[in-house]
Image (cartoon, rainbow, N blue to C red):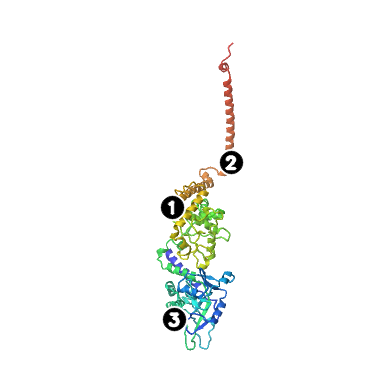
Amino acid sequence: MISKSVKNWLLYYRASLIDASRGRRNDMLEEPIVRRDFNLSYFENDEIKIISHFLRFDPYCFKCGDYISDSASFDAVYTNGKEVEVVKIDNKNPDFFHKKPLKFYRIEIAPIYMQPEREHAITIKEEDTHYPYWIPAYMREDGKLFPPKEGDIPLFLREYLAPNPHENPIIADIDQLDGENANYLFNRDSWNKYWKDCENYFIKVTGKKYADVQIITEDSSIVKFKICKYRNNNMTNNIINLYNFLVKKEDNDYKNTLLEKLLDPTETKTTADYDHIAITLPKTHYGYMGDEFPLSESQREAFGKYQDAFHNDVFAINGPPGTGKTTILQAFIANILVNAVLENAPMPLIVACSTNNQAITNILDSMKLDNKKQDPLKDRWIPKVSSFGLFLPSSKTDIKNYQYTKDFKDGFCSEIDNEGNAIQYEKYFLDKFFAYMNQEKFNVDHNKITNITQAKNYLRNLIDRYKKSIDNCIHITHEKITINQFLKNLYFPPEEEIVPAIEKNNNKIIETEKLLHTLETYKRNLEEKYLSFPFYIKYFSDRKSVV
């Protein structure tokens, strides 16, 4: 039953996300753009001025190595299929002022509108006009239109999709939309192809052409296009597509998933059910990131509970800023990796996700390698690796100085997986290895360790020794902490009563030993005195006197 519940929740989450992402557009240009037909590929000069002023705080440009500053290079981005970065222009940055990149604006265009039926004499107000379908686009500063480069697709607003409890006009059914949304591919090589695909997409979803909705008659022989500020739905679309993929899977595919664990009604242990000593002294705590700030008592308790098999499937930590959530997260990650090494298992894939990029970049910032003392052991033994984290951003504008990839084929991954660098990487690793050996004064024969495998085997032996040392410390600490329970099981009084008695007995033993030492000295002296007597004294000392 849990698997069916998982699918129902996925459907609910998907519907909620669709409702939130396909919300009403508010930042719209007041007056529509008027044309004689539905073909739109550029804006006139007066329209450019109005739109540019409307979007004056949100100019963008392309960056391909350097900023693109001429029309020919801009056009080549599409004709040649170049990979470019979309960068928001900061007018306070002198770099933009000197290089003068060619600006464009990110907009959305509504090619059709819907109005309620009214009697002939009643004027329909603008607030009664509905714009259910929006097409993302780039408007270059000369007014020419281009397809978006970041994967955005046209959007039907949720309030105009059935089922819908509102009185708004309905443009399409949401199930039909979801099916087309998951399968339709838009040509982005040129504006004309993209614009045509957007209309074909509209036809597939609604079963109507633009002209069937925004009717052109002799009395109304114009087409009105509404313009609004761009609203980024790229990440939302990716998540919706993921939900579409998940809900089509078989029930058995949901087994052992995170959502199934969350929905599992089986009663779990409460905090009071746990052995506090076992929790605070977990037997598998071998890894820790950094050596400046050890875990506090509450962090150790949280760490131990996370290690406990009874409730580490889903584990929640809550606390205000500055309470050490990131620190314990680092401890979790370090320990997972170290235990994988100790078990000679493949490195696990650890994913951090959030509703906002700031939380992710905070984690990434905490994972950066700050090795000011140039300690080889606190460094990564692979070139150009500056962090333990890999960033998967929604756009390249968010990457800053992070190790990033979009699809595990570009960015950091393309560099690190380049087989042509294997020899260089091996040499770099071995140089770091021997630097660490020299620092710790380990007696290592350079002639016997000539490759990474041999170096790893040597390091594994070191790690095993450190593990045994840690195990011994934990065992001694556990014995110390549990001594009273041990004594109680043997019907002895507690440690605090036994220790003074032991000390008292120790004092008596010392006093007795001193007395014995004194008596031994007396005995030895007497024996020496006796031996010094003449023979006749010793011989006649035991005879009776004769008269």
What separation in Å lies between label 3 and label 2 (alpha carbons)?
95 Å
Ranked by sequence position, the earlier of labels 3 and 2 is 3
**Residue 308 in view here:** no
**Residue 378 in view here:** yes
Mark 1 is on which residue type? Thr
Check whether the beta carbons of the residues at disc 3 and disc 2 lie within 8 A of each other.
no
Graded by Cα atoms within 10 Å as few (under 14), some (14 to 19) or many (20 or more), the crowding at tag 1 reads few
Mark 3 is on which residue type? Lys
Q: Position of residue 276 (x, y in %)?
A: 52, 52
Residue tagged 1: 453
Of 419 and 315, nearer the camera is: 419
Check whether the beta carbons of the residues at disc 1 and disc 3 lie within 8 A of each other.
no
Quarter residue 531 falls in = top right
Residue tagged 2: 500
Of 59 and 174, nearer the camera is: 59
Nearest to viewer (mark 1 / mark 3): 1
Residue tagged 3: 209
Mark 2 is on which residue type? Pro
Q: Position of residue 147 (x, y in %)?
A: 48, 75
